[in-house]
Image (cartoon, rainbow, N blue to C red):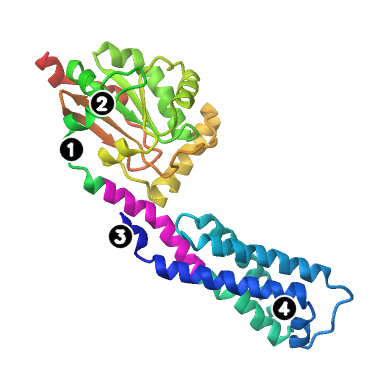
Amino acid sequence: MNLIQNRNASFFKAILYIAGAYHLLWAILAILFPEFFFTLAKIDLPTNFELWQLIGLYTGILGIGYLLAAANPIRHWRIVAMGFAIKLIISISFVNSFFHHTDNSIIFKMMVINHLIWLPLFAIILYNAYKHQYLLDNELIRMNHLSTDELLEMYETNKGNSVHNLAAQQPVMLVFLRHFGCTFCKETLHNINKYRTQIESQGTKIILVNMQEENKCTQELAKYNLQDVEFIADQESLLYKAFKLKRGSITQLFGFKVWLRGIYLWFTKGAFITSPEGADVYQMPGVFLIYKGAVIKQFIHQSAADNPSYLDLATCEKCLVAS
């Protein structure tokens, strides 16, 4: 994973170090020698330079931010994103003004150097930050060589029960959630509560898997009358990767089907999106029926909006024959 993280690290660091140094130099000139750029552009000096010096101060703060982000560009992508957004807005405003008015060519060149040339460079860093987690996902999945039986021995529920032992005694339906703020996660919990009696009457035990800490899980599950259902708080999402549940693509998370069903759930069930509070918002869910160390059935979501048949997934004919 270090190879993945450092593949383009030197290039990204160089971009941010140069950006930081340039913006700091520009800020120093604007603050200490405010007339410099006006003289260079042969523009009449303003009556006061306070506003110009404030712009220089904000530019200097950005420069410091870029230098700090250079230590780990992928981890500190939010600083880069902020700079990208600011430069994009300024560039669009200036280009619009340039095509409607006659502007000084030196000022235009200054705008190009200050903003336009950084946009593609920052975009490259942001794109790689976005792809980085997907590469890590694939690497974690590839590195997993444990059998289902061995894997379940490593995990216990919030009540201290071994998932391996539970699945040896009866079928266990592992329901992997996204995050409690997700509209479709709320629908899942609503459905689990709705079909719980029928699922458990078949001898199948429900265990919920989520990425948030135990107290938060208990509070959220209580909203759906599921506070006594056992769960696994997989905050590092390692169990997700062990079951090959990846991060979703843009289409899987924000596609037409997602918007359509999301709007439907908002209006019919009041399942509005709320804060994920630390969970990975890109993580995809899934459902697995486990019995005696084997996956009997599974449903891996192809869209965040998929709504599997929990009753069908909980039914285990092989388990009834074996018992």
- Mark closest to the chain's N terminus, 2 or 3: 3
Residue 214 pos. (x, y %):
43, 25
**Judging from the image, what secondary structure is the residue with disc 4 in?**
helix
Find the distance from the CA under tag 2 to the CA under tag 3. Answer: 39 Å
- Distance, label 1 to label 2, CA atoms, is 24 Å
Q: What residue sits right under mark 2 in the picture?
A: 313
Which picture quadrant has residue 35?
bottom right
Mark 3 / mark 1, whichever is N-terminal? 3
Q: CA distance from mark 3 to mark 4?
A: 49 Å
Q: Picture coordinates of residue 115 (x, y %)?
A: 61, 72
CA gap, disc 1 and disc 4: 64 Å
305 over 154 or under it: above or below: below
| Amino acid identity at mark 1 | Leu
Q: Quadrant of residue 87?
A: bottom right
Q: Choose between 30 and 103: the one closer to the eye.
A: 30
Amino acid type, callout 2:
Leu
Q: Which residue is mark 1?
A: 146
Which residue is at 30% across, 35% downward?
Answer: 239
Disc 2 is placed on an element classified as: helix
Sequence-first disc among 2 and 4: 4
